[in-house]
Image (spheres, rainbow, N blue to C red):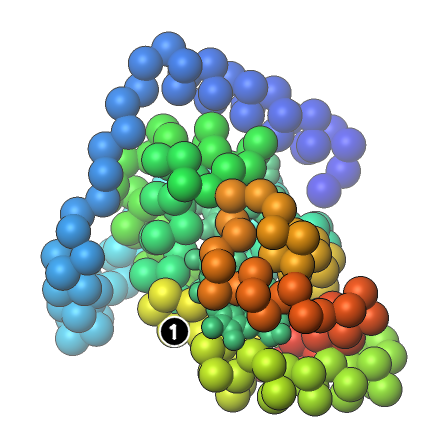
């Protein structure tokens, strides 16, 4: 992202948070069973899936400034959303919206999205592909693979694809992973889920770097 578009993002972010402060009321998403039923319907109805993806892409036009056109992020400290589990994405958007998770940019932005837009955005990003990044240092990535098998596969899965409640890590940007793991390790920030912080507390700085190098290479 060039300086011009970064300035634009900051400007629009400021305008959107002004809108939010001007009284936009957060509408919670439907209960989990209803969301599950909606997602299950999309799996058996290709035309409905296609139109949800198209609506999600339209609703996500502004998100692409940071997360990339198809959810493959343009910046190392901003997470890829492509290929992430739909429920995980929707849950995280809802957490930013109702204040359970906080980020200077994200928290204001998602507040203006209606429940249907949030659902469609999650379906859109989940349907996109994330390309793996070749390792720059293969010894470091191999060491990361060992830590991953030892400490992470139980929750994030052998291939790092996650599940409905747990993030996909495969192909994720290294800079974002290092920041997230460091914050978990220090128990810092609103994203500090106790299931994650207890694991991350035991990681060294070198192990975090190795894990990030390895996870980026996973398809
Ligand atoms: C100004 C840049 C910016 C814009 C625009 C932006 N995001 Fe984000 N997004 C971020 C950053 C930075 C994070 C990481 C925040 C953190 O670490 O808690 C993030 C995190 C997320 C996450 C959590 C991902 C994860 O793996 O935990 C989701 C979901 C998300 N954004 C969705 C969106 C949606 C939907 C939009 C559009 C409405 C959007 N973002 C627009 C910067 C942005
Ligand atoms: C006991 C289960 C568990 C184990 C083991 C575990 N995690 Fe997690 N992890 C979670 C949960 C749950 C979340 C999602 C928290 C949330 O809802 O934001 C998470 C989130 C993350 C995130 C943030 C992803 C994102 O996009 O928001 C990263 C990075 C991560 N884990 C890396 C790891 C690594 C690396 C290991 C091994 C060293 C590991 N995790 C082991 C449960 C686990």
Q: Is residue 73 above or below residue 2?
A: below
Left or right of 105 on screen, residue 123: left
**Which quadrant is home to the C terminus?**
bottom right
Residue 60 is situated, as x and y percent measured from the top left of the image, at: 43, 44
Residue 209 shows in the view? no
Residue 183 is situated, as x and y percent measured from the top left of the image, at: 65, 52
Q: Residues within 10 Å of mark 1 (few under 14, many from 20)?
A: some
Q: Between residues 50 and 99, which one lies in front from this camera angle?
A: 99
What residue appears at the point 48 percent right and 59 percent down from the top-left corner?
A: 194
Quickly name the residue at label 1.
163
Furthest toward the top, the residue is 22
What residue appears at the point 28 percent right and 50 percent down from the top-left corner?
A: 119
Number of marks in the image?
Answer: 1
What residue appears at the point 55 percent right and 23 percent down from the top-left corner?
A: 12
What residue appears at the point 27 percent right and 23 percent down from the top-left corner?
A: 25
Residue 113 is situated, as x and y percent measured from the top left of the image, at: 33, 35
Residue 195 is situated, as x and y percent measured from the top left of the image, at: 47, 65
**Which quadrant is home to the N terminus?**
top right
Q: Is residue 10 above or below residue 66?
A: above
Q: Quadrant of residue 166?
A: bottom left
Left or right of 58 on screen, residue 4: right
Dot 1: element:
loop
Q: Between residues 47 and 200, which one lies in front from this camera angle?
A: 200
């Amino acid at each position: 992202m060039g300086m011009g578009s970064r300035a634009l993002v900051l400007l629009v972010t400021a305008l959107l948070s002004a809108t939010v402060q001007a009284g936009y009321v957060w509408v919670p998403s439907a209960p989990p069973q209803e969301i599950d039923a909606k997602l299950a319907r999309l799996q058996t109805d290709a035309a409905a899936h296609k139109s949800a993806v198209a609506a999600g892409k339209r609703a996500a036009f502004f998100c692409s400034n940071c997360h990339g056109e198809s959810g493959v992020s343009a910046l190392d400290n901003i997470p890829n959303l492509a290929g992430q589990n739909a429920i995980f994405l929707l849950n995280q958007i809802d957490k930013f919206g109702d204040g359970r998770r906080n980020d200077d940019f994200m928290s204001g932005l998602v507040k203006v999205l209606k429940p249907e837009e949030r659902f469609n955005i999650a379906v859109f990003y989940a349907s996109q592909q994330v390309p793996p990044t070749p390792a720059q240092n293969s010894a470091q990535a191999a060491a990361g693979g060992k830590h991953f098998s030892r400490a992470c596969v139980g929750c994030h899965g052998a291939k790092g694809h996650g599940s409905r409640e747990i993030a996909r890590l495969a192909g994720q940007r290294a800079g974002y992973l290092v920041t997230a793991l460091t914050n978990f390790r220090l128990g810092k920030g609103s994203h500090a889920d106790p299931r994650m912080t207890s694991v991350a507390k035991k990681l060294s700085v070198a192990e975090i770097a190795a894990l990030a190098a390895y996870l980026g290479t996973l398809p």
